[in-house]
Amino acid sequence: MSSFIKYFSILFLVGCVCLFASDKDGKKVNNYPELTAPITVIEGVPGQWDENKPHTMSIVEANMDGYKYWAYYGLAYYGNYEPSVRKAGLARSNDLIHWEKYEGNPIIKGDCRWPTVVFTNSTFYMFYAEYNSDCDSRIVMVTSKDGKNFDNKEVIVPMEKGKQNQNPFIFYNKQDKTFYLAYYNGIERDTVPGNNVWNINILKSKDIKGLKNAKPKTLISSPQTLAAPSIAYYNNKYYMLVEFFATDKWDGKWVTLGYESDKPDGKYVEVNNNPPVLYDNDACAFQYVLDGELYITYSHCLDLPNWNWELRMVKAKK
């Protein structure tokens, strides 16, 4: 082999090492895409229903009533499980930057946390979490034709004593024409050391109403706080984002970790980003591909002791 070929081969191998990381099974793992600087998208108004800080934001492309994008947002709360605190509102936009709140807000007037919506067959399907007085939670689905008035409530993931079933994210995969509902399932309030667990579960069905009969599959499990999944198909792969919190990691801040897989309910491997995808008390991320671009809405904590959050948006750089 000539010295030129040897030199070229070394450069090629070094380049491959720099471009990819591998997990223990040899699967190549890329970084999550580089993101733009964040912007604040929706703020609560003191004295109004949403003064308790907009916290999550689910976007659909509806093209109705003069607006291309319709977004459904839920509120942050801490230490208050009164159903009246948990409401959902609607905001609309044509550019994903400037949002106008619907004058009839809130559209869900109580016991609604983490609204996530998909628009299909001229119908809006909203999933969200409901709670009992012990903070056990379940996931329900409601429907609407106009995107403003929702009814026909059905239980999709039932309540279990002492457990959480919450943080739903609905994803329609155009690749296999299947609906996927990812959510957090776990035990987080047990006083016995080692009993608490945080699972990311997923349901799938060709018919969205069939999700209530689907068998859950656990994708990720952790002994530390790991919740709030969202899924997007971008760059020919499936990305999952989850929030993570541990007092002994990332300076005790909330972070958002990224994972990738070759299918929505497949094996997810953590991406190679360091620091994490979002890392400065950033959580509750929802990701969407809109007009071919990847967007993330998420909640950034301005004051953790007082649980003061701000709803932000970033997108993948081109």
Image: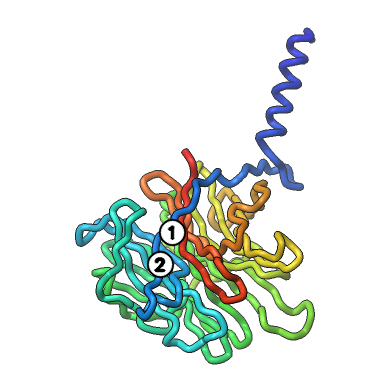
Residue depicted at 37% across the width and 67% down the height: 72
Which of 1 and 239 lies nearest the eye of the viewer?
239
Quadrant holding the N terminus: top right
In the image, residue 305 sits, relative to residue 222, either above or below, namely: below
Asked if residue 212 can be seen in this view, the reply is no
Q: For the residue marked with disc 1, what is the amino acid? A: Thr
Q: Which residue is mark 1?
A: 40
In the image, residue 301 sits, relative to residue 176, either above or below, namely: below
Give yes or no for contact between labels 2 and 1 (Cβ–Cβ under 8 Å): yes
Q: Secondary structure at mark 2?
A: loop
Q: Along the horizontal axis of the image, is 23 left or right of 88?
A: right
Residue depicted at 61% across the width and 82% down the height: 163
Asked if residue 260 can be seen in this view, the reply is yes
Residue depicted at 66% across the width and 79% down the height: 187
Q: For the residue marked with disc 2, what is the amino acid? A: Glu
In the image, residue 67 sits, relative to residue 234, either above or below, namely: below
Q: Along the horizontal axis of the image, is 61 left or right of 203?
A: left
Residue depicted at 28% across the width and 53% down the height: 94
Q: Secondary structure at mark 1?
A: strand
Q: Along the horizontal axis of the image, is 180 left or right of 24?
A: left
Query: Residue 202 location in percent, x, y?
Result: 55, 65
In the image, residue 10 sits, relative to residue 129, either above or below, namely: above
Label of residue 43 in the image:
2
Number of on-image labels: 2
